[in-house]
Image (cartoon, rainbow, N blue to C red):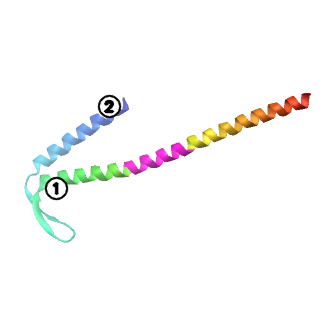
Amino acid sequence: MKGQTYVILAISFIILISIFAVLNVEVVEVNYLFWSGTSPLVFVILFSVLLGGVVTAFVSMKKYYELKRENKRLRQQIISLETELEEFKTSSLSSETDNNN
């Protein structure tokens, strides 16, 4: 259900941005770092939204891989601790058996 909500919100956002961009078709001057040029405002708006989406995706991928790496490390730690616990149980059982004899 949560995934469907995100898809619906994304589609709504895309439709809203598209309508806004199509309503702004006049030519504007765009100042870049070292030069300037003219371009239809619709292209400037759509390019800005696209660039924002790409940057957001890269930041999200970085966070995703960090969490994945942390998850893997914690799973290995759990396995190590479970193995240690089993060894402790078997050693304590064998020492109890030795003490009873």
Residue 48, how many percent across, how many down? 22, 54
Residue 59: x and y, percent? 37, 52
Q: Where is residue 44 in the image (x, y as percent from the top left)?
A: 16, 56
Residue at position x 22%, y 69% in the image: 33
Instruction: Give the side of residue 84 with respect to residue 24, left or right.
Output: right
Name the amino acid, label 1: Val
Disc 1 and disc 2 in contact, CB within 8 angstroms:
no
Determine the image quadrant of residue 83: top right
- Which badge, 1 or 2, is on the more N-terminal residue? 2
Q: Residue at 13% x, 52% y: name it.
A: 42
**15 within the magenta span:** no
Does residue 101 appear to the left or right of 9 in the view shown?
A: right
Q: Main secondary structure of the magenta part?
A: helix
Over which residues does the magenta segment extend? 60-73
- Mark 2 lies on a secondary structure that is helix
- Out of 67 and 9, give the one closest to the viewer: 67
User: Where is residue 95, by image quadrant?
Assistant: top right
Query: In which quadrant of the rendered image does the C terminus lie?
Result: top right
Give, as a three-letter code, the residue at label 2.
Answer: Gln
Tell me the quarter of the picture where residue 98 sits.
Answer: top right
Residue on which disc 1 sits:
44
Which circle marks residue 4 in the picture? 2
Q: Is residue 67 within the magenta segment?
A: yes
Residue in the image at 11% along x and 47% along y: 22
Quadrant for the N terminus in the image: top left
How far across and down, in percent of the image, does residue 65 sit? 43, 47
Q: Is residue 100 left or right of residue 29?
A: right
